[in-house]
Image: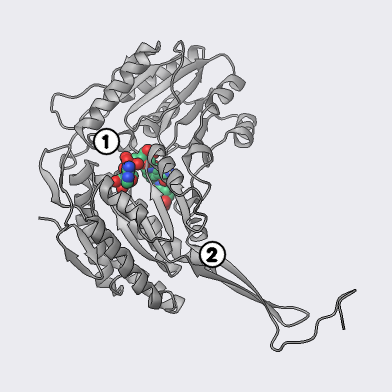
Amino acid sequence: MAKGAYIAGKWAAGDGDWFEKTCPATGDTSWEGQAASAAQVNQAVENAREAGKSWRHMPQHDRTRILEAYAEEIGARAERISEAISRDMGKVKWDSLGEAAAMKGKIAVSIQAQVERAGGKSGDTAFGSAHLTHRPHGVMAVFGPFNFPGHLPNGHIVPALLAGNTCVFKPSELAPAVAEIMVECFEAAGLPPGVVNVVHGGRHTGAALLEADINGLLFTGSAGTGTAFHRHFAGRPDVILALEMGGNNPLIVWDPADVDAAADIAAQSAYLTTGQRCTCARRIFVPDNGFGGKVIDALVERARGLKIGAWNEDDVFMGPLVSEKAAEAAVDFQTMLSKAGGKPLRRLKRMDRGGGFVTAGVIDVTDASSIPDEELFGPLVQVTRVKDFDTALAMANDTRFGLSGGLVSDDDALWLKVHNEMRAGILNRNRPTVGAAGNMPFGGPGLSGNSRPGAYYAADYCAWPQASQVSDKAERLEAKGFPK
Ligand SMILES: NC(=O)C1=CN([C@@H]2O[C@H](COP(=O)(O)OP(=O)(O)OC[C@H]3O[C@@H](n4cnc5c(N)ncnc54)[C@H](O)[C@@H]3O)[C@@H](O)[C@H]2O)C=CC1
Ligand SMILES: O=C(O)CCC(=O)N[C@@H](CCC(=O)O)C(=O)O
């Protein structure tokens, strides 16, 4: 049985509600145990605060060295990390191995970012010297999502630690297992007890962490939850919030010479990780002509041809959704689009093998009305045929979100227009909307976050800058009208 709380360097059974996670591919129980209670959450925060007293004063190179060792430990456990993630949330093997590799790769990027974005500098002034220093916030609560249960919380935790903060990590209750391996890696790397604490559980544990004495909330998850958390901390400018949320991401496909290449890009944008990436394309715009028709046909052909299976089967592209509930929600979303006038060209359907398995869907919403600007976190893509490029661009931008977007076109002038006018933090040309680079900022405007992008820019929200003007001795000051 898994343990519910890792506090001050020791695992303990949780005192909260019992919960378990079932693998959506095999039906096996992948994690079971008790959640951390509110008392345990408070204890974890207190221990993180205590540990912070020495961690924040440790020389930067010593903190860096521990995190470099952590990277090695992650690398050595890539196979186990991949399996834990796949068993919990169903991600296929090559994809979860990719996540494990990203976890390791992120550490070097974060170390570089800490130096380049949160380092210090000094210079001479007329009176002495001026200095820039960065200081940690204190105790950071880290909330992880289920879709990248290792890589994305790791992308908050590592920069937070490098900057001298300590963390209390609440993994997603839909993919809790990988956190235990992360702890194992931190221990093996020599991280002092209390610097990272883990509290397992769902909403109750999360709510207790929000109420605890934290200095920052580093969140990756849905816009609904992130917005509720933002509301929770209204009037609390003393708590730093970094909210990484979802998208309703557009991809415009406009007359590239290679229809198959365009369809490949569109299909991978829509269906990678079973559509459970925040950067997945949800809306595809094509010209209302023969070319647009060919792209749609080629996309449908790809949706039909994807090999779907369990993480422990060979050569599968797409695993199941995270749960049966998610599969039902995806079907319901498609039904809602159909009622609004959408025409399914290839239906997203629950598969006979049960669990979270669904087929990949394409729905033509050209003639639909009142489509909600919502993210469906699954493999269903909406296509719209439009009369001209400006209409495509205007429709692409007609969203409250702004995470990712893209253009598939050989036309440089169109790219220039899209680059200047499409409102998306991750904006690609002739590349899938997914697969963002860790050495760049990751986030977007609107409801996709609170303008505190992560990845390379995570260093910015993990420390506050301090500016000092220094004169070695106190000297008399002069100013017009000031008494001498
Ligand atoms: N922009 C980004 O960097 C990314 C955003 N996402 C977004 O995350 C979502 C998928 O992840 P989910 O795990 O479903 O998100 P979620 O919002 O359901 O959960 C995220 C975390 O918040 C906790 N939580 C949820 N409701 C809570 C409540 N009422 N009180 C306290 N804690 C609560 C969960 O237990 C979990 O740890 C998608 O919307 C996706 O777009 C996912 C990955 C990257
Ligand atoms: O944080 C980073 O290193 C870059 C962000 C990243 O890995 N993005 C991935 C997955 C995130 C998601 O979509 O849920 C991507 O863009 O595919």
Q: Specify whether tag 2 is near ligand 2 (CB below 8 Å).
A: no
Q: Residue 440 carries which label?
A: none
Q: Which mark is residue 464?
A: 2
**What residue is drawn where x is 22% and y is 38%?**
315
Screen quadrant of the N terminus: bottom left
Q: Which residue lies furthest to the front in this view?
A: 483
Residue 163 or 380: which is nearer the viewer? 163
- Colouring: one colour
Question: Residue 353 in the image: x percent, y percent?
Answer: 13, 28
Q: Residue 2 falls in which quadrant of the image?
A: bottom left
Neighbor class of circle 1 (other Cα within 10 Å; few <14, some 14-19, many 20+) is many
**What residue is drawn where x is 40% and y is 66%?**
161
| First-in-chain label (1 vs 2) | 1
Q: Name the residue under label 1.
A: 317
**Count of all numbered marks drawn on residues in the image:** 2
Relative to 10, does residue 216 appear above or below in the rendering?
Answer: above
Determine the quadrant in which ligand 1 lies.
top left
The amino acid type of the residue labelled 1 equals Phe
Question: Residue 421 in the image: x percent, y percent?
Answer: 62, 33
Screen quadrant of the C terminus: bottom right
Residue 299 or 163: which is nearer the viewer? 163
The amino acid type of the residue labelled 2 equals Trp
Relative to 17, does residue 118 appear above or below in the rendering?
Answer: below
- Disc 2 is placed on an element classified as strand
Q: Specify whether tag 1 is near ligand 2 (CB below 8 Å).
A: no
